[in-house]
Amino acid sequence: MNAKQIDCKFATRGSRFKVSVVPAHRMLLQANPAAAQWGWRELRRNPRVYARGRIRHPDRATITLPDWHRVVMNTETETDTMRNVAFID
């Protein structure tokens, strides 16, 4: 939910409510201006990635995807049978 949606929900109930969203990096930069030089990188939660074309992997045969396909994370390490197995690369 964004700030506008929250505002609307409270307004429909007759409440007055002001939502202000301040990103954490702005607060950090206000407190420590030198933080702007720290080499930040933007990461996204739950990103969606799509692939098309030739997919190569050293341990697998190359496949060709003629259309766009959504790429999902491998979750084999989350199963009960893998709880005592660790992959170290």
Image: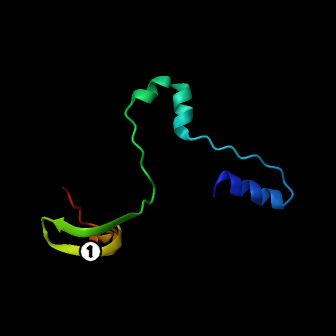
Q: Quadrant of the N terminus?
A: bottom right
Q: Is residue 9 left or right of residue 86?
A: right
Q: How many marks?
A: 1
Which colour style is shown?
Answer: rainbow
Q: Is residue 67 left or right of residue 17?
A: left
Across and down, in percent, residue 50 comes to: 36, 66
Nearest the eye: 52 or 16: 52
Q: Is residue 19 left or right of residue 45?
A: right
Nearest the eye: 10 or 53: 53
- 33 to 27, vertically: above or below: above
- 63 to 47, vertically: above or below: below
Q: What residue appears at the point 76 percent right and 46 percent down from the top-left corner? A: 18
Indicate the quadrant where residue 35 lies. Answer: top left
Q: Secondary structure at mark 1?
A: strand
Where does label 1 land, which residue? Answer: 65
Q: Are there few (<14), some (14-19), or many (20+) residues within 10 Å of tag 1?
A: few
Q: What residue appears at the point 51 percent right and 37 percent down from the top-left corner? A: 25
Say which amino acid is labelled 1: Leu
Across and down, in percent, residue 74 comes to: 31, 68
Q: What residue appears at the point 50 percent right and 25 percent down from the top-left corner? A: 32
Indicate the quadrant where residue 78 lies. Answer: bottom left
Across and down, in percent, residue 16 comes to: 83, 50
Nearest the eye: 28 or 57: 57
Residue ranking furthest to the right: 14
Q: Quadrant of the C terminus?
A: bottom left
Q: What residue appears at the point 50 percent right and 24 percent down from the top-left corner? A: 33
